[in-house]
Amino acid sequence: MIARLYHEAFLQHGVPWHPENTERLRAVVQRLTDNGLWHELAPLEFEAADWERLLWVHEEGYLEDLEAASRAGGELFAPDTVATADTWETARLAAGACMEAAEAVACSTDLQALCLVRPPGHHALPGRAYGFCFLNNPALAAEAALRSGAARVAIFDFDGHHGNGLQEIFYPRGDVLYCSVHQHEIFPLTGTVDELGVDAGLGLNVNVPLPEGARGEHYRRAWEELFAPLIRRFSPDLLILDAGYDGHWRDELTGLALEAGDYHDLVARAAALAEEVCAGRVQVILEGGYDPAALALSVENTVLALRGEAIQEPDQPAPEGHPRQLERVATYLDHALTTHRERLGV
């Protein structure tokens, strides 16, 4: 069974001119409703995360500032990160949804979860809003799963931007494996192959940065040749897919060239591995994706993949890549895979 976690309150945060606006979720819900998938997903009730649980990941002073800023009508936390009067309550509700889903999935043998939430989370730092993000939804979800009995959690982040907040939170930890494939040298300018974790987390922070033009074939190689073997060896009790769809070729916030069908393939492969290593326990958490139509089709394909069903509507193919650029992508990928294999023994 696949649970869906969504609330119309997620539409209250934000401003219309911002790339991370309400039309993103509206497009997803509308598409899933039109094709009948919405009512095939079981609604799961949830509440806003309370202060004590937010402190599992975030600093008290930052939470006080975020709450105060919202109650005062809003504040610019960074040039691209705008809190409004509704941000505090909306972000707490999104975090609560992800935490509730993680606990439910971690304690079940026949449940997966799709968290259609906003604002997104993987850039949020313990003490700072960053990159459209205020509370780190996937980090809070992983922590909730661990505190509800899971021994280990793996996170596969395929957002087009590196999840610097996730990396920082779990960098010294031995109970969370963080795997990220993302575009190189764009915001937030983190996520190199040399950022491997420290202390108990050494070797559990694994980045594959790729240049613009990277396509589904490159993501599949990263998954099959590196991430899947690492996750299999780590043997998590829960696999979180930190699902950003801004790598789609029509999305203007990255220069990647994935198609909606590539997300179907990645999620299908991840779900199959989860069946092998953690009784199928998969949680999908929405991150980026700023072309509403491309986002909606990609989320539809994610749901179909979780259900073991074929693609319903083919995506418009990405433009052909220039041979020299594709060669450059392959060089970066080969370097990352070789470096990690030698260091990590996979």
Image (tube, rainbow, N blue to C red):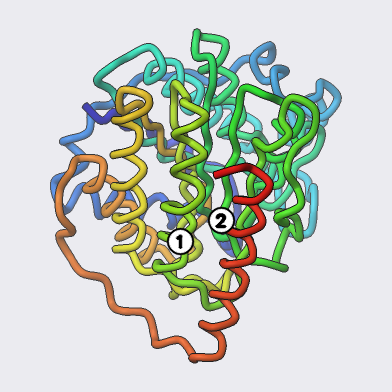
Q: Residue at x 36, y 43 (%)?
A: 270
Q: Residue 181, labelled with which disc?
A: 2
Does the rendering let one see residue 39?
Answer: yes
Res. 7 in view: no
State left or right for residue 2 relative to residue 92.
left
Q: CA distance from mark 1 to mark 2?
A: 7 Å
Q: Are marks 1 and 2 in contact (CB under 8 Å)?
A: yes
Q: Is residue 33 left or right of residue 81?
A: left
Extreme residue in the right direction: 61
Q: Toward the viewer: 235 or 52?
A: 235
Q: Residues within 10 Å of mark 1 (few under 14, many from 20)?
A: many
Q: Quadrant of the C terminus?
A: top right
* Helix, strand or loop status at disc 2: strand
Look at label 2 and name its amino acid.
Answer: Val
Kind of residue sitting beneath label 1: Tyr
- How far across and how far down the image is residue 188, in percent? 73, 57
Question: In the rendered image, which residue does mark 1 sit on?
Answer: 219
- Towards the viewer: 203 or 36: 203
- Residue located at (46% from left, 61% from top): 219
